[in-house]
Image (spheres, helix red, strand yellow):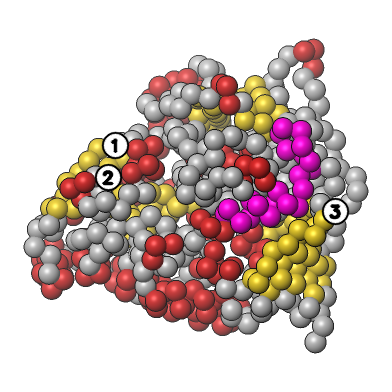
Amino acid sequence: MYRRSFIAAAAAATLPLARPALGGKTSTLVFVPQANLTSLDPVWTTATVTRNFALMVYENLYGRDQAFNPQPQMIEGHVIDNDGKRWTMKLRDGLLFHDGTPVLARDCLASLQRWLKRDAVSETINARVDAIEAPDDRTLVWRMNRPFPLLAHFLSKVQPQPVMMPARIAAATDPFKQVSEIVGCGPFRFLADEYVSGHSAAFARFDKYTPRQEPASYTAGGHRVLLDRVEWRVIPDQATAASALTAGEVDWLELPQPDLVPMLKRQPGVTTGLLDIYGTVAIVRPNSVLAPTNNVGVRRAMMAAIDPREALIAAMGEDPTGWRAPMGYFLPGVPAANDAGMDFRRKAWTSAEVKTMLDKAGYSGERIVLLHRTDQVVYHAFISVVAEQFRKVGLNIDEQMTDWGTIVQRRTSKEPLDKGGWSLFPAGAPGPEYVDPMLANTLRSNGAKAWFGWPDDPKLEAAYSAWIDAPNDSTRRQQEIAFQEAAFAYVPTIPLGQYLPQAAWRSNVTGLLKGSAPVFWGAEKA
């Protein structure tokens, strides 16, 4: 049967552009990010700090509201017809890139093609899409070989993001290499001549950006910029960053050290609170290609060796409102969360029991290279506990202290351990990635196309595909159980738990939007 559905276009009227600074005064907000900004390409890396950078500079066809629902962002809306096998998307009128050129459908097509060569979702989309076309300057057409109702959900994902850039950049840049020129169409322009890795980055309001009319909600809606300029200042030492906030030298700390938050709460002119309402999932990522962590039995023993409560208490403190552990492979409280396999995770395994598991797996003391992140207190704290727990059960841990920027570069390597390779590294996956199998980038197990660590498990992939093609929510719940069972059996990653860090900002900064990433639209500084 022919079916046609339509998401209504936004009203023609748009929000007014940000007001100019009064009296010639420039409104500048100084932000301290959680880590150094080492990569500027959100397609090349999934680093959270790069995601936050990209949300300022780039835009997606769809945004994602606080309930994780996709909403038209760069497009007016979409039409689905041909029994669900054709999607037609219309770009909003007047979209401009930061270099002054108009955003055309062929730019979006080139950007999507680059993203699909890199993102773990490419197999899912490519198996269902016969062609993506740009028949005119404002129209994108997706031709499917079968109905694909979740297309908008995929295109609204934020890590890695299907960001739109000029075709001259997207088409000319290998997705496995980083772009050398940053040109987006988002609400802020990146000031490349002011960027110093390890020190600072700067952004200016894009005066030709026209926000949507709808209220802002996470990455969706009207990105109304009220600041003239945003400066990111990298301050690795947490005590120094807290002192700078107290003195009014900076305006916003994304991730202050948890044990400094009580002190910051007492400071005049400082406000603290939970902006990241979905938190972050602390994970340990094993290398599924190199021995000994390519051994499923060793990975399961490693999971059993870790007491996630101890790890998150070390990172976030005793207050249980700041963390949730243990957890399975979905975010606590979301519909996908289930009890499958959780007995294994909840059990307090003794050292003797874990050693028996390692013996059965054939582990005989092989070196395990653990990349230990030292430049962010949460990661440093929880991986210190994990390393000690590994040693207690007899794992031969070669703990290599390094910064996150180095890990981002090094984790791409598949070289042997004696040639700079790695076995494990700690990371934090944004909470929304664990809402359902679709967004679980760290859980995809499609081999060479998977996230760093490259797990390869047909059972996990079968459950993933079945979830994508499920006809209703009831069937999806069943597949989420199958997905979690397969994940506990294979261990593509080790989730420790969810942590909910508070942010801190000067009290004269208002309008900060809650979500799972720091965004700067709506923010004002008196």
- Which is more toward the observer, 31 or 130? 130
- Name the quarter where the C terminus is drawn: top right
Q: Earlier in the sequence, mark 2 or mark 3?
A: 3
| Residue labelled with disc 2 | 371
Q: Earlier in the sequence, mark 1 or mark 3?
A: 3
Amino acid under disc 2: Leu
For the residues labelled 1 and 3, the Cα–Cα distance comes to 48 Å
Q: Residue at x 13, y 73 (%)?
A: 360
Establish if 426 lies above or below 364: above
| Residue labelled with disc 3 | 10
On the image, the x and y values in percent for residue 315 come to 34, 44
Mark 2 touching mark 3, by CB under 8 A? no
Q: Residue at x 76, y 58 (%)?
A: 134
| Residue labelled with disc 1 | 402
Establish if 243 lies above or below 333: above
Q: Is residue 108 magenta?
A: yes
Q: On the picture, is 384 further left or further right than 327?
A: left
For the residues labelled 2 and 1, the Cα–Cα distance comes to 7 Å
- Which is more toward the observer, 116 or 10? 116
